[in-house]
Image (cartoon, grey):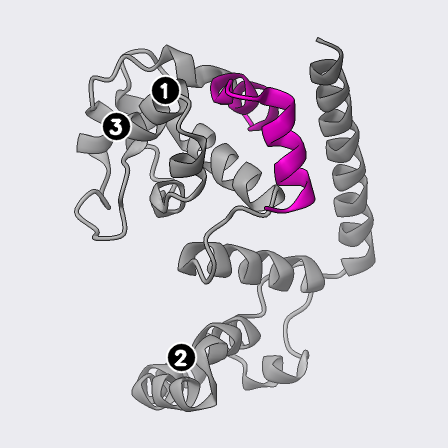
Amino acid sequence: MSNLNEQMADRYKNNFLKEIEEQAEMGEWVKMCMQCGLCSGSCPTHFHSGWDHPPQEIFMLIRAGKREEVLNSQGMYMCTSCYNCYVRCPRKVPVTHVMHGIAEYAYRIGRAPKAQPTLHLSKTFWTNATKYGRVNEVQLTQSLYFKDGIGSGIKKAMEMQKEALGLVMAGRLNPMEALGMGHKCKDVSGIHKMLAKAEELEAKNKAAKADTAGKE
């Protein structure tokens, strides 16, 4: 276990519900779930083989103190943010936000599953978008295509060459973006400053939350 993971496990002992309530975004909503299953029935990815635990099962496992099973689950990463669950929940539990919050917490303490595809996409997209102030579609595609190696990347690129050429001809894709050129935001440095400030405020909030939890 990572140091932070060990610290959290030791701090909360067997009270995993309290750990999620205090450390995961909107984790305090977990106890409001009444296990009706509408979230799972409304989810467009419920049929996917990687969905080991749907939302209401994740919430039930948290309340049962099944820390290892939850943190090792792929369920939180299957969310597509369609918000069907949120809209249909009879108790208005913000299921989407809670699932993302649990996934972010697992990642923060070093417990996210290795090579998790949704996590890889999220990290790649975020890094790309924050670097340029907008998504560099060519570099994003390259990073996704070649994540499993050069051979796999070339194969995927060849399979999609017709679609890529069509986008270029329509002016919807700029090959120069591969070199960091093409469309850019006017004030990238301003965006970087804004994000740095947001990260600073988020770090302060998390530190204050952790300090409060440590004193209880």
Q: In the rendering, at what x and y percent does residue 149 appear?
A: 46, 84
Residue 32 visible to the viewer: yes
Three-letter residue code for mark 1: Ala
Q: Where does label 3 land, which residue?
A: 39
Please give the name of the residue rendered at 27% of the width and 52% of the height, measured from the top-left corner: 50
**Quick check: marks 3 and 2 in contact, CB under 8 Å?**
no
Q: Earlier in the sequence, mark 2 or mark 1?
A: 1
Q: Is residue 121 left or right of residue 165?
A: right
Which of the labelled discs sits on residue 167, or is there none? 2
Q: In the rendering, at what x and y percent does residue 209 appear?
A: 71, 20
Displayed quadrant of residue 203: top right
Which of the labelled discs sits on residue 64, or is there none? 1
Is residue 23 within the magenta segment?
yes
Q: In the rendering, at what x and y percent does residue 153 appear?
A: 43, 85
Magenta stretch bounds: 1-25
Tell me: residue 190, above or below residue 153: above
Three-letter residue code for mark 2: Leu
Please give the name of the residue rendered at 41% of the width and 91% of the height, measured from the top-left corner: 151
Q: Is residue 52 left or right of residue 74?
A: left
* Residue in the foreground of this view, choosing between 9 and 121: 9
The crowd level at tag 1 (other Cα within 10 Å; few <14, some 14-19, many 20+) is few
Q: Which mark lies nearer to you, 2 or 1? A: 1
